Amino acid sequence: MKSPALSTLLLAATCAGLAAQTKTLGLLQSDPARVSPGYTLLPPKHNGNTYLIDNTGQVINSWSSQYEPGQSAFLLPNGHLLRAAMLPASGTLGTGGGEGGRVEEYDWEGNLVWEFDYTSNTYAIHHDLRMLPNGNVIALLVERKNQAEVLAAGFNPNLLQDNFLLPDAVVEIEPIRPKGGRIVWEWHVWDHLIQNFDRSKNNYGDPAAHPELVDPNSSPRKLATFWNHMNSIDYHAGFDQILLSVRGNSEVWVIDHSTTKAEAAGHTGGRSGKGGDLLYRWGNPMMYAAGKATDQILYEQHDAQWIPAGSPGAGNLLIFNNGVNRPGGNASS
């Protein structure tokens, strides 16, 4: 069976509570004439099945896995399903959300054509991933840093809640089908820190003068162990840049993907000439001493992405702003 043409893919679930405290599960449409044409890709939580449904609620295709879903799934142009999957071992790091550790690719007929596990007691891929035009996959990675490493990086110990920290990174995986992969590029937030707490450390400096770097002590509250808590990743082929949703900072960051691995760990090189330093950040200027609490716009956001060509607002960023701790606002975690 060939893949149908796909004009719109949305990750969504519909559930409505009725006055009698019963629930209706299925398709709810208030104005079918205004519904965007296309299909909806739905990987229910705590379920190994992924469904592709049309606007009448009919199942177009489904895929079955022995693993619960991670936090993202995509239908590729060739009709294959690319999904994040959750391995129990990924939960031992202590992130408290977004566990993953596994990538799976299925063909249209439901055959597993690629699997890749990347998790241990010190690292795990998590939350989100994207397939690049070259067929490689970029994914978020969390990695464990012990207390000595954290203090050596200039973190204020009074801000820590535990004796270790879980900062984020990005890895690019070259698939080795049918099983396995090779890390061909990586970027680590740990390589791009600046702090004015401990002048004995190599990364001591003025965070306000270097918004391209990340201040580990900028938060007004104690730091969560899952420090950055990145929850989405996107890629812009025209710019060769990566967009990151950094929930822990209530910011979005853009980094240069055109760098080598060595350049991504430094401050020069790549198309931008800035190596792995941040090219752009937005949402919470307090994180780089450029604003006050009233200037904050994002509040623990999710799903930052570039709007694709041909869609309204093409080239802009689309972000779900959860509103956690937003003054006077309703919040969704």
Image (tube, rainbow, N blue to C red):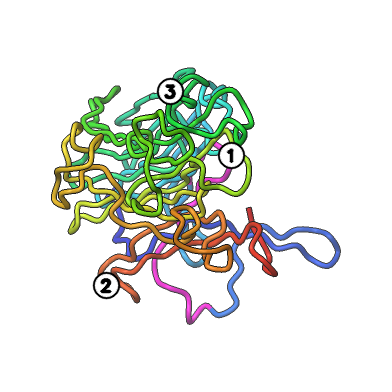
Q: Which residue is mark 1?
A: 223
Residue 99 x/y as whole percent: 52, 33
Residue 259 horizontal side relative to residue 25, left or right: left
Residue 282 x/y as whole percent: 41, 61
- Residue 37 in view: yes
Marks 2 and 1 sit apart, C-alpha to C-alpha, by 40 Å
The residue tagged with tag 1: helix, strand or loop?
A: loop
Which label is found at residue 19? none
The residue tagged with tag 3: helix, strand or loop?
A: loop
Q: Which residues are magenta?
A: 32-50
Q: Nearer the viewer, residue 128 or 212?
A: 212
Q: Residues within 10 Å of mark 2 (few under 14, many from 20)?
A: few
Which amino acid type corresponds to the residue marked 3 in the rendered image?
Thr
Verify CB contact (< 8 Å) between mark 2 and mark 1.
no
Residue 140 x/y as whole percent: 39, 38
Which amino acid type corresponds to the residue marked 2 in the rendered image?
Gly
Which amino acid type corresponds to the residue marked 1 in the rendered image?
Leu
Quadrant for residue 310, please give it: bottom left
Quadrant for residue 306, please give it: bottom left
Q: Which residue is mark 2?
A: 310
Q: Which residue is mark 3?
A: 119
The residue depicted at 37 percent of the width and 57 percent of the height is 281
Mark found first going from the N terminus, 1 or 3? 3
Mark found first going from the N terminus, 2 or 3? 3
